[in-house]
Amino acid sequence: MSATQDPPPRTGPIRLGPHARAALRPTADPVVAGGFWARRQEVVAHAGIPQGPLLLESAGNLHDLRLAAGKATGEFRGDYPFMDSDVYKWLEAASWQLARLHPDSPEGRRLADDVERIIGLVADAQQPDGYLNTWFQAGKGRGPFTDLRWGHELYCAGHLIQAAVAHHRATGREQLLTVARRFADHIDATFGPADSGKPIDGIDGHPEVETALVELYRETGERRYLDLAGYFVDSFGRGLLGGETYCQDRVPVRSARHVEGHAVRQLYLLAAVADLATETEDAQLRAAGERLWSEMATTKTYLTGGVGAHHDKEEFGDPYELPTERAYCETCASVASIQFSWRMALLTGSARYSDLIERTLFNGFLSGMSLDGERWLYINPLQVRDGHTDQGGDKSARRTRWFRCACCPPNVMRLAASFEHYISSTDGRGIQLHQYTQGTFRGEVSEAPVVVSVNTDYPWQGRIAFTVDESATDEPWTLSLRIPQWSSGFTVQYPDGALDENTAALDDGWLRLTRSWKPGERAVLELDMEPRFTQADPRVDAVRGCVAIERGPLVYCLEQVDHPGGGLDEIVIDTSRPLTAKHRPDLLGAVTTVLAGGHRRAIPERGWWPYPSSDTAEFVPRENGAAAPIELTAIPYYAWANRRDGSMRVWLPTS
Ligand SMILES: [Zn+2]
């Protein structure tokens, strides 16, 4: 490329194909500049991503690649056949980060060196026939593709492909894409319907390669990758994996009525369903995506956006089965939910998908990473009880430096590093802003560029200002602003100064501002950020009689460290006393806390045998019969477990 050429448009994890039929298209060159999310991205850029190579070295992943390449001796290290996927997810995260760095900056050069070195290890480990999985290459199983239920070879291939697409989009370099294509071609030559003459009619126990193959089609234009993705998606539910619910093999996705089984597997599969519906106009797949998303969002999603109620088999669980202290809510499941929802948002244009993305991003996703970006949660419960004993390990309610099964940390890194690509879209008639963060976002109007910059201190403040930076058209166009589902009221100020308080009509969750926008014109949206009490559907037995505290998009929780003098499980909240927001620049990297009123209930002196008869079952107030009021300090849920170990709860009993 000559020095005078403009760099190609910077695209993210999704770039629709030329024949795609979607309501919205993601826009190129989004920039997040300053504010809440820029700080989270900086943490990932300065802590998580640079430490990746060291952690992958000490966990054995890089050794396993050298072993497969014949450049190391010894045993395979690590307990799982999907060790390679951690490397690929890190490469994807690092690639998105590289796209943001100047290639000649010291930071950019250092990261590019790490990326090149690790891509070299991956390339060396690949077999001449394109196969690549260090577990099987180390002789750990019976051989390639002999254990599709548990072998994770196609799952790892999917992450390799996604990393390669990211690296190609971010740097224009081909090396990793060449490795990924060779593996994809090997898979394409190996897998197909029984009458195709290919050796294996089969699927991987862990969906992931399907959505990756669609993206590989989008990146290369090779239609057979899209067809292969379609074959895999339609092969789930045929009994090729013994009909197991865990592996999404009980029922074909086209006729499925419920999200079920392993949450991450279900959601990666559904991301591919949305991708295929977008690229092929398959109405049945689109209907399946819409139906299953609705079932998940209305009956199987925690307040935090987390999904997966069962520790056992990491499964969704039944409708309204949402226990708080046993919530599984794997961090990866939040990532997968966001990926599925974003594809549905683009396909349908409906704002509700981005409502769920917002809830998940700010709560069940962000809680997976510590504030300093150096420790992680695999599971994200909504309650840790007083007296909780914790054995540590992957499924601990305490943050951990890295996991034996390290799927979540690099998954958080790759989403955080590409976060700006989940904010804006265009429909050719303007810009849609799905999330609110400071930055600059582009759209198109009859192929002419339009650019809007956003200024806000969201989520701490509800005021969001939009300025049109560029509008290379005289046509009227539409700035679409998502009005969050949680918002009880909003005010919009138009460029002519007119003010609209709670009267502007919404269109499928969108506020549409249509006019002949001129550069420099401004509109201001003000969302109501009063803290609020939230109740759950009465069918959620686990939290009946409880409320949660929310403010804006943030779910709040109580932590033991802010409430000395007793346990959290004794606390009853008084909903007749008002909630007040208080910004605390000194606390947890600067957060807005919410103060509430409550009191402690106590166990009667005679003891509280667990099951007294109902007429004597009464909590007596602690101090001589008088309920001493106490002040409760709620912090944003995403920031919990960053101070002393102790109890935590989101849902609070009201009596
Ligand atoms: Zn995970």
Image (cartoon, rainbow, N blue to C red):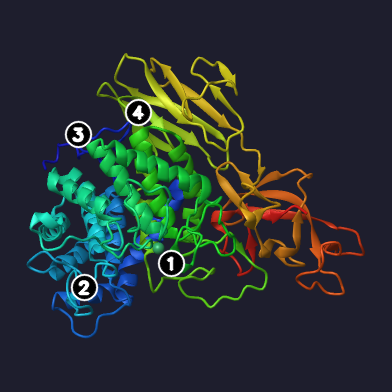
Q: Earlier in the sequence, mark 1 or mark 4?
A: 1
Mark seen at residue 490? none
**First in residue order: circle 2 vs circle 1:** 2
Direction bottom: furthest residue: 74
Q: Residue at x 24, y 60 (%)?
A: 203
| Towards the viewer: 316 or 632 | 316
Give the residue type at disc 1. Answer: Lys
Q: Which numbered disc flags the more N-terminal residue, 4 or 2?
A: 2
Q: Amino acid at mark 3?
A: His
Residue at mark 2? 134
- Tell me the distance, in whole angstroms, between the alpha carbons under discs 1 and 4: 46 Å
Residue at 29% from the left image edge and 76% from the top image edge: 60
Image region (quadrant) for ligand 1? bottom left
Q: Residues within 10 Å of mark 3 (few under 14, many from 20)?
A: few
Image quarter where the N terminus lies is: top left
The answer to whether residue 531 is left or right of residue 374 is: right
Residue under pointer 3: 19
From the viewer's perspective, is 559 left or right of 57? right
Which residue carries the number 4 mark?
451
Q: Is residue 92 visible?
A: yes
Relative to 461, say whether 192 is above or below.
Answer: below
Query: Residue 587: where, in percent of width, then height?
Result: 61, 56
